[in-house]
């Protein structure tokens, strides 16, 4: 039998305040957008990437509202897992969604670590970005190991310096904009414009990171919505302002599209060497802070699965000295470090990460719509109620996330490829295995994602079966919140009636 009190020794401490939560959203996301993808995403659409930033920002705001609303009901570790599993009284759907998201977090850490290495080359041209990224992951692994309080302090300091570095670029840059540089605005037609949407949305990929740390945020009903919605709004303003500036000061957008450090490249167009160095230093801080936030949030998913007894119990074990789930942290560090050396390029890793995040964003938004329509008991527990706004944001986020998901997966190309897959072996042209691999070359994201899901479902099935043999009380498990002590959470807001 499972007991909520038996899990209290592995609960997490609420040591993170509002500013720490907001810096997790802002500083933890900036490295993914401003300093990595804001330039490269223009390769298919030119300066109209500015408009993509705006539209992506609208979608990001809708997702932030959805997550923040659900977070006030279930302020737990691994936010989306708790929102889905506790709403539907089943561990399986939450596990499926967050198992893919865990892959996204590990890929994102690898991408950002490589981005850190690229900005470090401004100061040390001969350095290998992969080695630099590995060193960064190692340092931040040690910082995260010692606890949430130390994480918050370091992230707050990084955010303060980072904002100065960005303002050094955008404020003077606003006075050097040449409108002629925006022409032609659309360089790749509608296909190119849509093609920029997936890598550009990666710029907002950390908007829900604070929700992953919901069990560690003080006064979550107030601070989580302020952090996620307020932080996302600040990100939208910074992204749009920066995009307007860098494409307005650089005469040829392809220079930015081909740059691994587009903000430093833009700074070179109108700032002196010292200012350019400051912007490059900002790139180092931004990518480092994003790695920091993704690492701190990513460890909460295996921790929560283990809390719910569908993953090895070691992953919910909390260090007695530091109060951190150290097995989860070590696993993420090892895998992310390996991906840093394995990745063939930023673009493929970015698409894989974005694909995994989008699955979670779409599912949480649909969960919100279900709660609004069918769970008045949960609606009453929400920390705020915007009336008609949350159903609207639910629809906007669900439709937008699914649309980007189809783009990230290249479903159109996949259908054509599978037609060849089914026909070629029958015609005796190529072996079945070769046809299978050729089909998935049209959708490399699914080539990695589907086998990953098979592994995850296998793990879940094993632990579900072991739980049945032990007579595990699933209802008692679902009466808890991952990472939250029994003294804090009142399971009376739920009526668990079903099993997995």
Image (tube, rainbow, N blue to C red):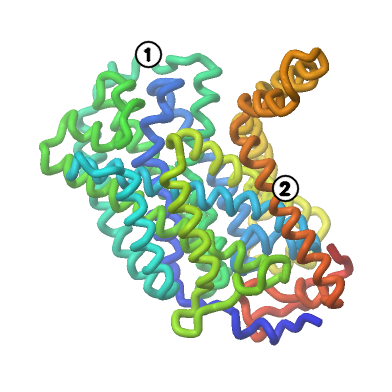
Residue at 62% in and 66% down = 72
Q: Which residue is mark 1?
A: 184
User: Residue 39, image x and y in percent?
Assistant: 36, 31
User: Residue 146, image x and y in percent?
Assistant: 40, 75
Q: Is residue 288 visible?
A: yes
Q: Is residue 478 above or below residue 458?
A: below
Q: Is residue 64 above or below residue 442?
A: below
Image quadrant containing the N terminus: bottom right
Q: Secondary structure at mark 2?
A: helix
Q: Identify which residue, 427 or 495, lies in the foreground.
A: 427
Horizontal side, residue 293 vs residue 256: left or right: right
Q: Secondary structure at mark 1?
A: loop
Residue at 68% in and 25% down = 434
User: Residue 25, image x and y in percent?
Assistant: 45, 56
Query: Of circles 2 and 1, which is in front?
Result: 2
> In the rendering, which numbered label is found on residue 454?
2
Q: Is residue 331 above or below residue 16?
A: above
Residue at 50% in and 34% down = 348
Q: Is residue 19 visible?
A: no
User: Residue 489, image x and y in percent?
Assistant: 67, 79
Residue at 41% in and 26% down = 42
């Amino acid at each position: 039998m499972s007991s909520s009190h038996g899990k209290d020794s592995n609960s997490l401490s609420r040591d993170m305040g509002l500013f720490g939560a907001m810096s997790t959203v802002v500083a933890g996301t900036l490295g993914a957008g401003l300093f990595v993808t804001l330039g490269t995403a223009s390769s298919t659409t030119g300066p109209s990437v500015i408009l993509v930033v705006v539209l992506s920002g609208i979608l990001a705001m809708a997702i932030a509202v959805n997550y923040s609303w659900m977070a006030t009901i279930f302020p737990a570790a691994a936010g989306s897992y708790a929102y889905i599993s506790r709403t539907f009284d089943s561990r399986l759907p939450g596990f499926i969604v967050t198992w893919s998201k865990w892959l996204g977090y590990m890929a994102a850490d690898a991408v950002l670590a490589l981005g850190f290495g690229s900005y470090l080359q401004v100061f040390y041209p001969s350095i290998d970005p992969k080695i630099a990224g590995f060193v960064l992951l190692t340092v931040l692994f040690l910082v995260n190991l010692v606890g949430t309080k130390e994480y918050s302090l370091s992230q707050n300091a990084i955010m303060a310096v980072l904002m100065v570095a960005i303002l050094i670029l955008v404020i003077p840059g606003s006075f050097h904009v040449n409108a002629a540089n925006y022409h032609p605005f659309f360089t790749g037609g509608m296909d190119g414009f849509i093609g920029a949407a997936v890598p550009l949305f990666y710029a907002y990929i950390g908007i829900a990171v604070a929700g992953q740390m919901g069990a560690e945020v003080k006064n979550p009903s107030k601070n989580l919505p302020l952090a996620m919605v307020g932080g996302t709004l600040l990100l939208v303003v910074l992204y749009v302002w920066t995009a307007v500036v860098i494409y307005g000061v650089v005469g040829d957008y392809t220079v930015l599209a081909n740059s691994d450090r587009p903000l430093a490249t833009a700074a070179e167009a109108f700032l002196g060497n010292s200012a350019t160095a400051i912007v490059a230093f900002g790139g180092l801080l931004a990518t480092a802070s994003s790695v920091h936030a993704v690492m701190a949030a990513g460890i909460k998913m295996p921790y929560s699965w283990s809390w719910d007894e569908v993953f090895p119990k070691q992953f919910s074990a909390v260090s007695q000295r530091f109060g951190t789930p150290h097995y989860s942290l070590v696993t993420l560090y090892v895998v992310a470090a390996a991906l840093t050396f394995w990745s063939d390029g930023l673009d493929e890793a970015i698409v894989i990460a974005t694909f995994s995040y989008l699955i979670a964003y779409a599912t949480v938004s649909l969960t919100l719509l279900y709660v609004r329509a069918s769970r008045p008991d949960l609606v009453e527990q929400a920390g705020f109620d915007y009336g008609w706004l949350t159903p609207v944001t639910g629809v906007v986020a669900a439709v937008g996330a699914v649309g980007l998901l189809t783009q990230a997966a290249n479903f159109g190309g996949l259908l054509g490829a599978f037609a060849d897959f089914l026909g070629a072996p029958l015609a005796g042209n190529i072996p079945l295995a070769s046809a299978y691999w050729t089909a998935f070359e049209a959708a490399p994201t699914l080539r990695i994602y589907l086998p990953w899901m098979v592994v995850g479902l296998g793990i879940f099935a094993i632990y579900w079966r072991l739980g049945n043999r032990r007579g595990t009380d699933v209802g008692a498990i679902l009466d808890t919140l991952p990472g939250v002590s029994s003294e804090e959470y009142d399971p009376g807001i739920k009526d668990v009636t079903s099993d997995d």
